[in-house]
Image: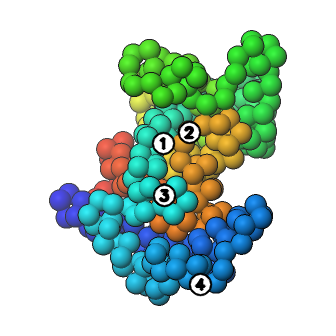
């Protein structure tokens, strides 16, 4: 087991390093740089910067150096726990995304719990009661959940909550708690404002996991060991929960590894619509402004979350399914 863990940690470190290289150089692929975007913004406002001043700005920010030199300087900063300096905000990247990253992780974790608590029981019921009214109903809503874009669902729920309940779902805090220090009242306010975003962000994941759980459980219920257990007189629900459900959850565990980074990166439009203080809108702004250190830092964190999620899901698979072995993986 120790050898497996060391090998997986080595693969994880290599994957994060590869993500850092790809993200840094992809961000620098479009023509121009942050200074070019900054000059274009000033030109829209009627201000013009000369070529000499633009070159001085590039020298000040280190943008006149080759891309590989900028990358290695960035890696040296990351080694010291510093993700770099944001040109757009004029602050270290750590300060720009610090509070937003915490709120993003809280929202993503709560959404994952919501997906599991809703999708797995529904998937089990749909499989056990195949072709029943419950199965058809959940299948219909599952397909709708997969088909409707998250941002459209966000707009509809914002309208309905305001018209029917006179409640604004924008943001994660009430105005009086936006800049307040953490307290029980602020945590309670955060929980109240997270309900709608969790439902919106978790709709597609819930619908997908329902279909996966149902399909895998139906496949397990047709296997010989189920017929053998029934022949020995084991009660139906005890049989289903003890063996087929456990086997059917393997793909669900693997799916969790990819839900977390999707919730962080895929919630950009939803965060903009709902005005959520997460890293999504910051990533969008950084990409538009070609703020390579800010965008690269966020993408690197997303890649790190993907790798960590995959690593944890592998460990959960070994724990959940005795058939999965450490050797050969």
Question: On the rendered image, what quadrant is the C terminus found in?
Answer: bottom left
State which mark lies toward you, 3 or 4.
Answer: 4
The residue indicated by pointer 2 is 277
Indicate which disc, 1 or 2, sits on the residue closer to the N terminus. 1
In the image, what residue occupies the spot 64% across and 84% down? Answer: 51
Indicate which disc, 2 or 4, sits on the residue closer to the N terminus. 4
- The residue carrying pointer 3 sits among few (fewer than 14), some (14 to 19) or many (20 or more) residues within 10 Å by Cα, namely few
Name the spot of residue 45 as percent of width and height, x first. 76, 61
The residue indicated by pointer 1 is 100
Task: Compare residues 162 and 199 and report the one nearer the observer.
Answer: 162
Task: Compare residues 279 and 51 and report the one nearer the observer.
Answer: 51
SS state under label 2: loop
In the image, what residue occupies the spot 53% across and 48% down? Answer: 279
- The residue carrying pointer 4 sits among few (fewer than 14), some (14 to 19) or many (20 or more) residues within 10 Å by Cα, namely few
In the image, what residue occupies the spot 45% across and 20% down? Answer: 186
In the image, what residue occupies the spot 67% across and 71% down? Answer: 39
Rendering quarter of residue 27: bottom right
Indicate which disc, 3 or 4, sits on the residue closer to the N terminus. 4
The residue indicated by pointer 4 is 52
Residues at marks 3 and 4, CA–CA distance in whole angstroms? 21 Å
State which mark lies toward you, 3 or 2.
Answer: 3
Indicate which disc, 3 or 1, sits on the residue closer to the N terminus. 3
Name the spot of residue 80 as percent of width and height, x first. 26, 64
| CB within 8 Å, label 3 to label 4 | no
Residues at marks 2 and 4, CA–CA distance in whole angstroms? 38 Å
Colour pattern of the rendering: rainbow
| Residue 328 position (above or below residue 313) | below
The residue indicated by pointer 3 is 90
Task: Compare residues 184 and 213 and report the one nearer the observer.
Answer: 184
Name the spot of residue 130 as percent of width and height, x first. 69, 30
């Amino acid at each position: 087991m120790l050898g497996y863990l060391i090998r997986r940690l080595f693969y994880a470190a290599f994957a994060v390093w590869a993500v850092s290289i790809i993200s840094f150089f992809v961000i620098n692929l479009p023509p121009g740089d942050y200074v070019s975007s900054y000059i274009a913004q000033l030109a829209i406002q009627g201000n013009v910067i000369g070529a000499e001043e633009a070159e001085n700005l590039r020298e000040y920010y280190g943008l006149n150096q080759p891309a590989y030199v900028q990358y290695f300087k960035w890696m040296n900063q990351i080694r010291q726990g510093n993700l770099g300096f944001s040109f757009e905000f004029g602050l270290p990247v750590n300060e720009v995304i610090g509070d937003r990253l915490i709120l993003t992780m809280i929202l993503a974790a709560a959404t994952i719990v919501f997906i599991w608590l809703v999708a797995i029981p529904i998937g089990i019921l749909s499989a056990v009661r195949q072709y029943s009214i419950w199965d058809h109903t959940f299948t219909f809503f599952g397909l709708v959940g997969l088909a409707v874009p998250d941002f459209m669902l966000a707009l509809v729920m914002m309208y309905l909550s305001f018209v029917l309940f006179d409640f604004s779902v924008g943001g994660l805090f009430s105005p009086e708690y936006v800049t307040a220090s953490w307290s029980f009242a602020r945590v309670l306010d955060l929980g109240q404002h997270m309900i709608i975003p969790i439902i919106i962000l978790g709709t597609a994941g819930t619908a997908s996991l329902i279909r996966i759980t149902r399909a895998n459980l139906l496949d397990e219920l047709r296997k010989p060991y189920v017929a053998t257990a029934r022949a020995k007189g084991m009660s139906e629900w005890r049989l289903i929960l003890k063996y087929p459900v456990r086997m059917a959850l393997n793909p669900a565990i693997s799916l969790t590894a990819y839900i977390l980074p999707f919730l962080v990166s895929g919630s950009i439009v939803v965060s903009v619509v709902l005005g959520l203080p997460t890293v999504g809108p910051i990533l969008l702004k950084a990409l538009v402004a070609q703020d390579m250190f800010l965008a690269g830092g966020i993408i690197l964190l997303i890649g790190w979350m993907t790798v960590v999620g995959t690593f944890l899901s592998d460990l959960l698979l070994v724990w959940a399914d005795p058939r999965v072995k450490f050797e050969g993986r």
